Image (cartoon, rainbow, N blue to C red):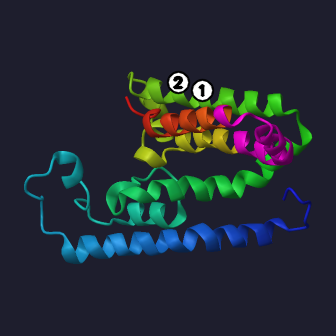
Amino acid sequence: MLEGGRLTYGAYAARRILRFYLPYIVAVELGIAGQQWRYGGDLAGLGDWINRFWTDDPGPRAMLGHFTVIGAFDSSTYDFAIWTLVHEMRISLLFPLVFLMIRCLRWRTVLGGFGLASLIMARLRIGVFSGHDELAGLARDGGYTAYVFTVHHLLAFAIGGPLADRRERLAAIQAGLPARTRALLLALGLTLDIYGARR
């Protein structure tokens, strides 16, 4: 996209489906097979969190949610780790619009808009756990695949877009920094990555 190559949305979507959807479906099917053929009840010595997986029967609604990645469905029913793929697929299909905004608007406007959207989603998430059940379908149902998280994760793509667009300039700035400064920035980045999400 950054090089200005011509690619129709249909071709783009087909590539996204091949990259994300096919591995996702294989993971879902393996999870369902494991539940049906290998599940033997709670695992002794492990807590409630791990023992809640594979406990639900694959009903039509859960299956439809998993195979369409639409709606509020609990992705941890069969495979806890696939929630990230759900958001990546949703966002990848929206990314041409995000890219167009990055190209047509000032980067501060883009980051400000997506930053505000992320804050609103966080507030909705807090609201639904404060008794506002009318928000449940958007902000609570579906666990980690709730739509509020999809909007929240768009912020990372909105940050990455302008950075990628200015990568040569940023690389030149980084190359001009003293070695000590670069080492400190690397240490800071690793520290934030490892410990930043801890509560």
Q: How many marks?
A: 2
Residue nearest the observer in this picture, 61 or 74: 74
Q: Main secondary structure of the magenta part?
A: helix
Question: Does residue 183 show up?
Answer: yes
Residue 123's label in the rendered image is 2
Tell me, yes or no, whether the two marked residues, 1 and 2, touch with CB atoms within 8 Å: yes
The image position of residue 118, as x and y in percent, is: 61, 31
Above or below residue 14? Residue 70 is: above
Q: Residues within 10 Å of mark 2 (few under 14, many from 20)?
A: few
Task: Kindly state the secondary structure of the residue where label 1 is placed.
Answer: helix
Task: Kindly state the secondary structure of the residue where label 2 is placed.
Answer: helix
The magenta-colored residue range is: 158-180
Q: Residues within 10 Å of mark 1 (few under 14, many from 20)?
A: some
The image position of residue 93, as x and y in percent, is: 69, 58
**Relative to 101, 18 lies left or right:** left
Q: Residue 198: say if magenta.
A: no
* Residue 154, picture quadrant: top right
- Residue drawn at x 36%, y 55% is 76
Q: Residue 161: say if magenta.
A: yes
Residue nearest the observer in this picture, 51 or 135: 51
**Relative to 35, 172 lies left or right:** right
The residue labelled by disc 1 is 120
Residue nearest the observer in this picture, 149 or 2: 2
- Residue drawn at x 31%, y 76% is 33
Residue nearest the observer in this picture, 53 or 58: 53
The image position of residue 158, as x and y in percent, is: 72, 41
The N terminus lies in quadrant: bottom right
